[in-house]
Amino acid sequence: MQCLHCRFHTPGEVVELREDPTWAAVWEAVKVLEDAAPSIAAELSGEVPVTADDENVADRGNWSQCVFVRDGRTLAPWESPRFQATVAALQRLRDTAAADLPKGSMMLSVLSPGSRLRPHCGPTNHRLRLHLPVYLPSDSSIASAGPPTIRVGNDTRTWELGKVLVLDDSFDHEAANPTDEPRAVLLVDIWHPWLSAAERDKVREDFVFNSSSSTRSYSMPHGRRGGH
């Protein structure tokens, strides 16, 4: 598990919410994803239906998603028999670390070759975001262009297959894929571990759920897949 943790204030943040430089309280959620990584990668590395970037975050190239959960609600891919292992792992988190989480997403995030997401931040700090790499560019592609990266605050990291990266997306962050192959991660939101039950109930009252979708498809080429 890697952790990205840099202060950036946003209008929706929970005041005086404790920060934790190791995020030890999210280890159980991390373990659920890392234990299931080979099965998840096997399901999500083939042709997967994706939706276009409806947040207009990409300032170069394309960012697309296969959304299983948006704003706490399951969408069409959740019901597909193709994704049984992925949904089983995500359901374990929906029963625990992400139970009734507003503004919570669970989705495959695909950053196409040569793409970049402009600096942006999430709407609130009541959640943490987990990234499980599903597909990373090959070593030869990285050697010629450099690896895909994510910057949060002043900290820039790369992804490692089979390992979850933890970040707070209420902080200023951006991502880039300079290679000629896609980068795909399973993105999962969970509750910030230091919120009390009463504070979680207050967050639920303050946010309204919504969802939308339009579908196309994306097929992964032969590169490095999680679990291999």
Image (cartoon, grey):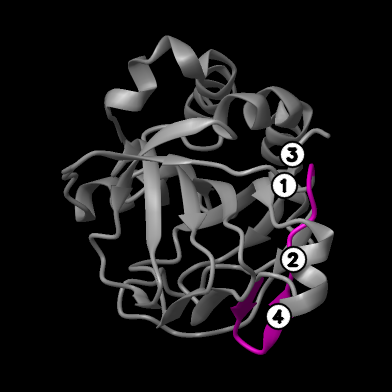
Amino acid carrying label 3: it is Gly
Number of marks in picture: 4
Q: Secondary structure at mark 1?
A: loop
Of tags 4 and 1, which is closer to the observer? 1
Q: Decide: is 96 above or below 10.
A: above
Task: Tell me where residue 53 appears, x and y as whole percent.
Answer: 29, 60
Q: Decide: is 118 above or below 165.
A: below
Q: Which residue is mark 4?
A: 156
Amino acid carrying label 1: it is Gly
Whether residue 158 sits left or right of residue 118 in the image: it is right
* Disc on the earlier residue, 3 or 2: 2
- Mark 3 to mark 2: distance in Å? 17 Å
Q: Which residue is mark 3?
A: 226
**Mark 4 burial class by Cα count in 10 Å: few <14, some 14-19, many 20+:** few
Front in this rendered view, residue 117 or 31 = 117
Tell me the tag on residue 223. 1
Q: Which residue is mark 2?
A: 141
